[in-house]
């Protein structure tokens, strides 16, 4: 029987196989040029990018069913740089390198160059990491719906950033952290420059790993050692001991981390100082009367 060839449109959604489990990792790379790390030495961006590309190819090399997505995060926008939204590149084998590895490298570098084109470095601008994690969770949820019934998709998110902690995005962080916990998505964080207490909370909530690397020159070694193994395998490896998690909350009035504060009994908003009216839900509270100490009577002798 002769059958006609039917050309189907190419889609960016990865195909799944029901033979084995599929491991998906979404790498979020903070490419904000306003980071102190990049302002002091712009050449570090190339070093970090090469390490992420090598880490991504190592993940694809572990198993044929493994899937990869890479995002670039900026102070104004976040977008996927792999897989690209446009037409796939025509990649040929170069110096014996596997075509898939060449495709990953060229696609990430070209799309990141477009992502950073025309963006002027702005000082003291926060990276939209919470929004990037939300986009990654939406991408994972879409792949969960499109997979075949017999396939199991294990998803995790790796955040590589050198930005400082941002209490302004506290509510956004908490929303994406608990959403990832509900979706059984592990969030890992690789801090390049400073300690990030809020992202450390997200790692602890979702069961991921948080690591502040001591030397930036060994970024690739830390990525392969700590973050390449999947969460079930990490229990059998000797990994850096977990640090104590700082669970301080950020106040809604000044967006600063506080140790002791006031909580609204209606909307659970947190404030560093007492206010008779909640600025979030506008609930009016009764001011408790001040206790007046009774004066001691003098005893006449």
Image (cartoon, grey):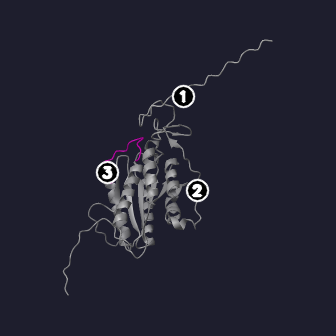
Secondary structure under badge 3?
A: loop
**Residue at left offset 56%, top offset 50%:** 245
Q: Is residue 70 magenta?
A: no
- Which quadrant holds residue 83? bottom left
Q: Residue furthest bottom?
A: 1
* Mark 1 or 2, closer to the camera: 1
Q: Position of residue 64 (x, y in %)?
A: 41, 73
Give how far apart the Cα atoms at labels 3 and 2 are: 38 Å
Dot placed on the residue nearer the N-terminal end, 1 or 2:
2
Magenta residues (range): 115-127
Look at the picture and state if 178 lies above or below 249: below
Q: Which residue is mark 1?
A: 288
Q: Is residue 126 magenta?
A: yes
In the rendered picture of this protein, how many numbered marks are placed on residues?
A: 3
> Is label 3 in contact with label 1 (beta carbons under 8 Å)?
no
Q: Position of residue 286 (x, y in %)?
A: 49, 29
Q: Which residue is mark 2?
A: 242
Dot placed on the residue nearer the N-terminal end, 3 or 1:
3
Q: Position of residue 73 (x, y in %)?
A: 38, 52
The reply, left or right, for residue 257 in relation to residue 70 is right
Q: Position of residue 113 (x, y in %)?
A: 33, 55
* Mark 3 or 1, closer to the camera: 1
């Amino acid at each position: 029987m002769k059958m006609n060839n039917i050309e189907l449109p190419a889609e960016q959604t990865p195909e799944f196989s029901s033979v084995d489990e599929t491991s998906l990792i979404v790498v979020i790379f903070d490419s904000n040029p306003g980071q102190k790390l990049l302002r002091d030495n712009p050449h570090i961006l190339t070093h970090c990018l090469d390490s992420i590309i090598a880490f991504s190819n190592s993940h694809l090399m572990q198993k044929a069913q493994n899937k990869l997505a890479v995002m670039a995060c900026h102070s104004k926008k976040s977008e996927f740089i792999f897989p690209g939204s446009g037409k796939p590149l025509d990649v040929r084998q170069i110096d014996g390198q596997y075509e898939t590895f060449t495709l990953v490298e060229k696609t990430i570098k070209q799309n990141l160059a477009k992502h950073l084109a025309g963006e002027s470095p702005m000082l003291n601008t926060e990276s939209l990491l919470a929004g990037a994690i939300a986009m990654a969770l939406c991408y994972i949820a879409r792949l969960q719906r499109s997979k075949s019934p017999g396939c199991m998709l294990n998803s995790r998110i790796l955040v590589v950033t050198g930005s400082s902690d941002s209490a302004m995005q506290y509510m956004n962080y908490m929303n994406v952290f608990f959403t990832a916990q509900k979706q059984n998505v592990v969030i890992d964080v690789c801090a390049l420059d400073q300690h990030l207490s809020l992202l450390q909370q997200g790692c602890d909530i979702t069961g991921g790993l948080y690591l502040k690397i001591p030397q930036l020159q060994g970024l690739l070694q830390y990525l392969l050692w700590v973050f390449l193994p999947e969460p079930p395998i990490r229990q059998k490896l000797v990994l850096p001991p977990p640090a104590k998690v700082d669970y301080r909350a950020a106040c809604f009035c000044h967006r600063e981390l506080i140790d002791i504060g006031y909580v609204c009994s209606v909307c659970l908003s947190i404030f560093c100082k007492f206010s008779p009216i909640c600025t979030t839900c506008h609930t009016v509270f009764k001011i408790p009367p001040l206790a007046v100490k009774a004066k001691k009577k003098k005893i006449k002798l």
